[in-house]
């Protein structure tokens, strides 16, 4: 079915041409698909696609709500995507944060983490100290874990219902209960991200996003064609996977898999790319997407995360889930 749809796009859409039909005549849909794969790997394609898209916060296909926590301002801003897929400031709340300054490193250090997190659960029944409800974040994320950070229970929650509290938390983000209820009413937490940094959310240039997206699909093309050298060249020397594989062990594993030369289909959807806040480091980005992978020996359908560093013309993968 995918090939049939791709064929009709080719003969009736923007890419229809005699040369493309010649490729189809000689190589079938496999040859046409290769043309599309190469187009997706070009910066020019993404520069055109991004031209009229709001990319101030990154490239966000699968995210409709952003909660941006500025640790210097001790604030929590809610941005929502409008009918034109542009993010607008909905609310700006004062917030209570961790007692200690800096990025969270371990359990009990009383610091609010710096990073990007999903809201993975809404708790409607919590101790009255946390207000009427709480949103549970995904801290520690994959990048946190491979760097040895630990701890848990980082929530966005309210204020005590029946008692006073200190002007700080043990690492969570706490806001007025009325404001928390407002967030509950406005967002679908499954379509939200929490961005926590020591300063305001940075602006992302379209040219940077075009390069990251083209690199993502260049990586995919190397993977799809079992080009071992090109594929592994995307992995940083300091790369580490959540299961503990470092670059050397990961390379050996992938070399064995690629040596089978299996035909494979790999599709990405709900792609999200945004800057990753790192104290003392720049050009780190979170790239997340839904992946469908199918070969003769393996099938996978699920969410994937890459933490990448963009250097000059390409990105290298630091961590992967």
Image: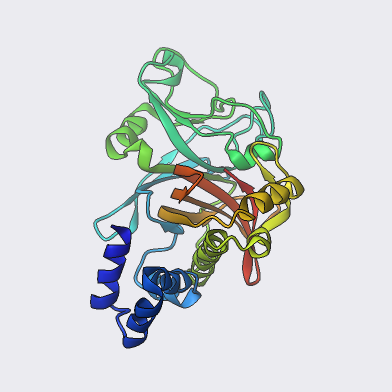
Tell which of 49 and 8 is nearer to you.
8
- 260 shown above or below 54: above
Q: Residue furthest bottom?
A: 18
* Residue 22 locus on image (x, y percent): 36, 83
Left or right for 185, reference 193: left
Colour scheme of this structure image?
Answer: rainbow
Q: Position of residue 143 (x, y in %)?
A: 62, 43
Q: How many marks?
A: 0
| 163 left or right of 18 in image | right
- Name the image quarter holding residue 85: bottom left
Residue at 58% from the left image edge and 29% from the top image edge: 171
The residue shown at (37%, 55%) is 61
x and y, in percent, of residue 131 in the image: 40, 20
* Quadrant housing the C terminus: top right
Query: Is 42 or 25 nearer to us in this picture?
Result: 25
Could you say where residue 27 lies in the image, as x and y percent from the top left?
A: 41, 75
Q: Name the side, left or right, on which 289 lies relative to 238.
A: left
């Amino acid at each position: 079915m995918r090939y049939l749809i791709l064929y009709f796009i080719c003969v009736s859409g923007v890419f229809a041409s005699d040369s493309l039909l010649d490729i189809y005549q000689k190589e079938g849909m496999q040859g046409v698909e290769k043309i599309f794969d190469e187009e997706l790997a070009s910066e020019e394609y993404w520069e055109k696609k991004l031209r009229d898209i709001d990319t101030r916060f990154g490239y966000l296909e699968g995210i409709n709500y952003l909660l941006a926590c500025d640790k210097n301002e001790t604030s929590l801003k809610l941005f929502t995507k409008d009918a034109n897929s542009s993010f607008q400031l909905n609310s700006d709340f004062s917030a209570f944060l961790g007692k200690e300054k800096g990025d969270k490193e371990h359990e009990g250090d009383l610091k609010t983490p710096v990073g990007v997190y999903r809201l993975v659960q809404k708790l409607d029944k919590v101790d009255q100290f946390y207000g009427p409800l709480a949103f549970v974040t995904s801290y520690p994320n994959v990048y946190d874990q491979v760097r040895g950070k630990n701890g848990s229970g980082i929530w966005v929650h309210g204020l005590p219902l029946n008692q006073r509290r200190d002007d700080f938390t043990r690492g969570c983000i706490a806001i007025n209960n009325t404001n928390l209820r407002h967030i509950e009413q406005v967002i679908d937490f499954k379509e939200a991200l929490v961005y926590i940094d020591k300063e305001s959310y940075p602006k992302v240039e379209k040219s940077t996003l075009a390069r990251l997206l083209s690199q993502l699909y260049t990586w995919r093309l190397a993977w799809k064609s079992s080009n071992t050298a090109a594929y592994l060249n995307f992995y940083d020397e300091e790369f580490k996977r959540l299961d503990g594989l470092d670059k050397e062990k990961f390379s050996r594993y992938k070399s064995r898999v690629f040596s089978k030369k299996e035909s494979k289909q790999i599709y990405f959807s709900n792609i999200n790319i945004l800057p990753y806040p790192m104290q003392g480091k720049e050009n780190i980005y979170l790239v997340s997407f839904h992946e469908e992978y199918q070969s003769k020996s393996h099938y996978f359908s699920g969410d994937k995360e890459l933490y990448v560093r963009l250097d000059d013309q390409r990105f290298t993968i630091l961590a992967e889930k």
